[in-house]
Image (cartoon, rainbow, N blue to C red):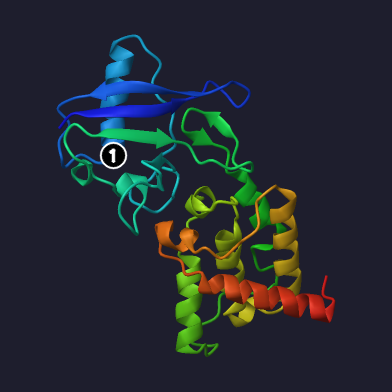
Amino acid sequence: MDFTLKIWRQKDSQSKGKFETIQVKDISSDASFLEMFDIMNDELVRNGEEPVAYDHDCREGICGMCSMHINGRAHGPGEGATTCQLYMRKFKDGQTIWIEPWRAKAFPVIKDLMVDRSAFDKINQAGGYISVNTGSAPDGNAIPIPKDDAEMAMDAAACIGCGACVATCKNASAMLFVAAKVSHFAHLPQGKVEAGRRVRNMIAKMEELGFGSCTNTGACEVECPKNVSIAHIAKLNRQFLVANAKGEK
């Protein structure tokens, strides 16, 4: 299979970027999108050209580092998958593919398709943890948890922090990410001790870092590679309202 790639190239965060056209040929339909990128970069290096910089790590859909906007969709065509789980058979032979980095004020471009997503780390540092000293690990069945709560907590914990929700949202909102972190703890007894402080601090940090507001279009849920539900945003809003009503800090 042959493809025409329109790839965003940008030297650094201070430079002006632009799309460059790169041709790739004889790509197997069974090759993953990142394998196709490896083949492309090998060819660029052989020709004495600068390879395209992009993030990747596990290549198993676990880490979420392979953040690319492909033909207008976060992680490309398909649902419930990251870019590294995307295969070239999803495209037509001879197709033109447009590839961009995440577009968000809070995710500045480092180089080409790489963006700085440390803003997510800062939100987590603001409250995405449990600081209670619980001693040694308790037995798994020592604290009864309703099945529905356990399933909702696990659904929220599936978030890998890739940033697809932010890249997809017209306001570059991080609400689905923050909601997943808050809801994960909100459904478990261990997270209730500092629930008010957690939600207030994480939302404050999200706003401080320049993420936009949520307008409930639901695009984040559609493009999330782990299918995290926007129902968690409702949980976040309830937690926030309760914390404000109680005046928790």
Is residue 162 in view? no
8 sits to left or right of 247: left
The one of 6 and 67 positioned closer to us in this rendering: 6
Q: Residue at x 18, y 40 (%)?
A: 92
Indicate the amino acid at tag 1: Phe
Residue 224 in the image, given as x and y percentages of width and height: 43, 58
Percent position of residue 162, x then y: 48, 50
- Determine the residue located farthest toward the top in the rendered image: 48
Nearer-the-camera pick, 88 or 98? 98
Task: Name which residue lies at 58% across and 38% down.
Answer: 116
Q: Tell me the quarter of the image containing the C terminus.
A: bottom right
Q: Is 84 displayed left or right of 8 in the figure? A: left
Q: Which secondary structure, mark 1?
A: helix
Number of numbered markers: 1
Residue 94, image x, y percentages: 19, 31
Q: Is residue 248 left or right of residue 77?
A: right
User: Which quadrant would residue 47 be assigned to in this image?
Assistant: top left
